[in-house]
Image (spheres, helix red, strand yellow):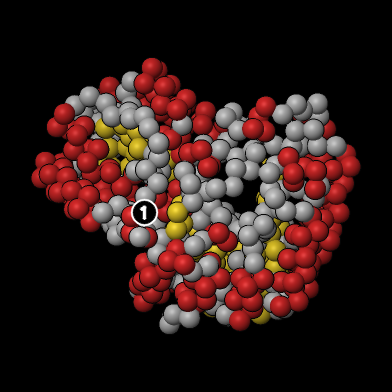
Amino acid sequence: MERRAFVSEKELEYQRECAERVRAVHAGETAWVDTYGCQQNEADSERMRGMLRDMGYILVSDEHADVVVINSCAVREHAEQRVFGNIGHMTHTKKENPNMKIILAGCMAGEETVREKVRRSYRHVDALLDTTSFWRLPETLLRLYEDGGRIIEDGEPDSRIAEELPVVRTSPYKAHVSIMYGCNNFCSYCIVPYVRGRERSRLPEDVIREVRELAESGCHDIMLLGQNVNSYSGGGKSFAELLAACAELEGDFVLRFMTSHPKDCSRELIDVIASHPKVERHIHLPVQSGSDEILRRMNRRYTAEHYISLIDYAREKIPGVIFTSDIIIGFPDESEEDFERTLDLVRRVRYDSLFTFIYSKRSGTPAAEMPDPVTHAEKVERFRRLNALQDSITLEDRAPLVGRTMRVHIDGESRTGELNLTARTQDGRLVSLKGSTELIGGWHTVKVTGVSTFSLSAELA
Ligand code: SF4
């Protein structure tokens, strides 16, 4: 029954045959996957890089590559404009290399308006591949090479899952593992359900196998990904059960997950976090607003009271747990009273940090049609007040960390400042410290020397 939601082995075998045929002629040419947007797109890009590597391409970061795949984001209109700007610029690049293939992939490729615009005005784009069909990349390239022309197909998203695609991971120590795709929630401001299709979950055995292989290969930081991980339902298992099974695997790794939806975040999940030390003591729980009226118009389907009851339950069960969240300021017709309720909720929850956004209209969503008499200047002022409040909470709550020792995973080099290494605590906070680059890739104990709203500074203990 369940397997009907999956791309068949025969279809995947056909993709491998196409890859071989592309490889026979094009091995040694260059390919670039340019990624925009969220971690889900990062994860999809890693699979596309895997397919390109198997086709013999040399992976580069250069718009002059022989194949350029733009893995786009549709969440914000100005991000779309940026992508179109970059694609427009590539007309010159393609004139220099007429054999170059340009493929627009990702969320934008699933939008009817984008398909039309590319058909009419971006004639140098060879193909579109939406998020549900990027596993057809080998077949797409083969058709472009052998048949010529362009591939811009209309129709519904595929809504099946392709397992066992090759992958080139960005880091050996950190990995994203998609556990589900799509979204059924239709928050009134969000385009995702229209471009990524309905929710579908991978089977638990497939997810667990991938996490086990990552842990065995020495990966220390594993993020389970989905648009709404709390509604995972693969093979009859809940997300809490899947998380517990992954957290019981052997290995020295921390397990993170993103994104949670407060209407589906269960007490069972909180109990699993509490009883499994490998799961990070941090919950990113996007609240979006503290006003029930705004939450209703956002179609979020929970109340501020329900949200706070989850926070209280988690604090009771998981000592030291920290919370982060997303908040949209200036949703259509947000009153000063609505905004004050958001400030009250922030004071009550005391987040470790917040991702705050001023609402921006997304065509194709119900919220884009809602009347909005609030001026931009008022929204900017509220945005400033919210961030000032959160900054003061962050600094107050982080101050007692100075002098404490903690275990961090050093995962890279910093591009700025004299603290040359970046690390993460087990609860996901960013840390800057000074040390040899040979420490990258390992767990180390550090002593916190300072805090800011952005990160902790530390020294090796
Ligand atoms: S839960 Fe809401 S905001 Fe998140 S992807 Fe789904 S529709 Fe968009």
- Where in the figure is residue 229, as x and y percent of width and height? 54, 59
Residue 63: x %, y % from top left: 35, 35
Instruction: Identify the amino acid type marked 1.
Output: Ala
Q: Quadrant of residue 171?
A: bottom left
Q: In the picture, which quadrant includes the N terminus?
A: bottom left
Q: Is residue 66 left or right of residue 110?
A: left
Instruction: Examine the image and state in which quarter residue 376 appears.
Output: top right
Relative to 358, is 3 above or below?
below
- Label 1, secondary structure: give it: helix
Kindly tell me whether residue 131 is visible in this rendering.
yes
Q: Residue furthest top?
A: 120
Give the x, y percent position of residue 249.
44, 80
Crowd class of label 1 (few under 14; some 14 to 19; many from 20; radius 10 Å): some
- In the rendered image, the vertical position of residue 363 relative to residue 132, given as above or below: above
Residue positioned 24% across, 27% down in the render: 97
- Residue carrying label 1: 5
Q: Image check: 161 left or right of 73?
A: left
Q: Residue furthest left?
A: 24
Residue at (77% x, 65% y) in the render = 309
